[in-house]
Image (spheres, rainbow, N blue to C red):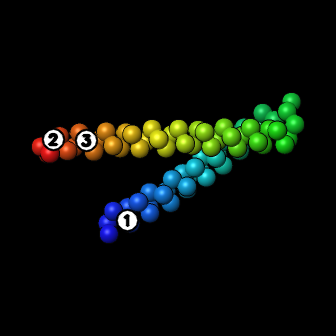
Amino acid sequence: MDNAMNNNTTGRSKKEFRKMLSAKLESSLLTFQSELKEKKFKAAIKRASKLLANDLFVKQKKKKEKNNNVMAENIGA
């Protein structure tokens, strides 16, 4: 039961993390819009923010797994 709850909260936090990062990236990049058409610019921002959010989430997940393995080795598992 705990595992199911953990998976559910992880999925929710992943979505929230991506939305937050996407919003922050979009707001900061809107200042550089001068030479590009608005539609293409927004599409490029969405693609970049999704890729960045996915990249950062994967890195955090790998770091967490590495820490879990180190803790397990210290315990003697």
Say how many tags the image has: 3
Q: Which residue lies furthest to the top in this view?
A: 35
Q: How far apart are marks 1 and 3 (CA)?
A: 21 Å
User: 74 or 33: nearer the eye?
Assistant: 74
Residue of label 2: 74
- Quarter of the N terminus within the rendering: bottom left
Residue of label 3: 69
Residue of label 1: 4
Give the amino acid at mark 2: Asn
- Across and down, in percent, residue 64 comes to 35, 44
Give the amino acid at mark 1: Ala
User: In the rendered image, which quarter is residue 59 located in?
Assistant: top left
Answer left or right for 49 relative to 10: right
Give the amino acid at mark 3: Asn
- Across and down, in percent, residue 13 comes to 49, 56
Q: Is residue 35 above or below residue 62?
A: above
Answer left or right for 73 relative to 42: left
Using a 10 Å C-alpha cutoff, classify the residue at mark 3 as few (fewer than 14 neighbours), some (14 to 19) or many (20 or more): few
Whether the residues at callouts 3 and 2 have beta carbons within 8 Å, the answer is no
- Quarter of the C terminus within the rendering: top left
Q: Which of marks 3 and 2 is nearer the N terminus?
A: 3
Provide the secondary structure element on which disc 2 rests.
helix
Residue at 32 percent of width and 66 percent of height = 2
Provide the secondary structure element on which disc 3 rests.
helix
